[in-house]
Image: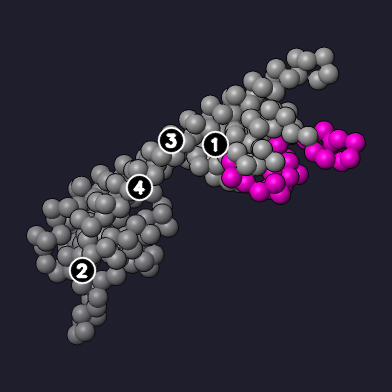
Amino acid sequence: MDLAREHGLSTQAVRNYEDGGILPATERTVHGYRTYTPLHAQALRAFLALVPGHGHRTATSIMQAVNRGAVEDALRLIDESHGQLLDDRRTLQAVEAALRDLAPVPQERGDTFIGPLARRLGLRPATLRKWEHAGLVRPRRDPQTGYRVYSAADVRDVRLAHQLRRGGYLLEQIAPLIAQVRSAGGVAPLESTLRDWQGRLSARGRAMLTGAAELDAYLRARETECEQPAC
């Protein structure tokens, strides 16, 4: 099947796409064979172009909506994907800003206790205890007094959590980043991770543009077909 070969797919995959509503329904020959047209080819190109930017599930939902005539639903799904990408960009910017503010501080200070640290950052000790319970910071305990002792790395983690909390991020959103800083051994090793993150977001944005162009071509092809007398 030329349609499958063009994209390196199996003929069964193309049939599955039709059965799943990703492609429009085909006409059948008298012998029961499916007849694929240039419209199906454009639908397949649109779907495959949408996947890198929106993910397989959303791309499937977009094509299903278009093929049942619910174009507004498809556009809403696209808008939601763009909104998620914007949220991800803002998260990255917040992380970069927080890490920039953090970078010079940790090595300048030694161990400290909860009271002085809370006062230094304008926080309540209860807030630091809450963050500890959430896994954001893990101070050791003084073996004699039982007091929490915050090392330079702990102070770094607290400051990062403080920056992100002020940016409106939830504790469950912050915890994975703190864990990554911890496992990387500090802020500096994360620079390449942040560059990779930025690269992935940029690639996603470009993929969304490509997907939009192919989907627009498919929508135009459907409109043209429906202008024909047989539509």
Q: Quadrant of the N terminus?
A: top right
Mark 4 vs mark 1: give the one in front: 1
Pointer 3: what residue? 205
Instruction: Please provide percent x and percent y for residue 140.
Output: 24, 75
Q: Earlier in the sequence, mark 2 or mark 3?
A: 2
Q: Quadrant of residue 180?
A: bottom left
Point out the stretch of residues depicted in magenta: 7-34
CB within 8 Å, label 4 to label 1: no
Answer above or below: position of 25 versus 197: above
Measure how far apart labels 4 and 3 are at the Cα level.
Answer: 12 Å
Q: Crowdedness of circle 3 by 10 Å Cα count: few (<14), some, many (20+)?
A: some
- Label disc, if present, on residue 150 of the rendered structure: 2
Total numbered labels: 4
Residue 6 is inside the magenta segment = no
- Label disc, if present, on residue 197 of the rendered structure: 4
What is the image's colouring? one colour
Check disc 4 and report its element: helix, strand or loop. helix
Pointer 1: what residue? 49
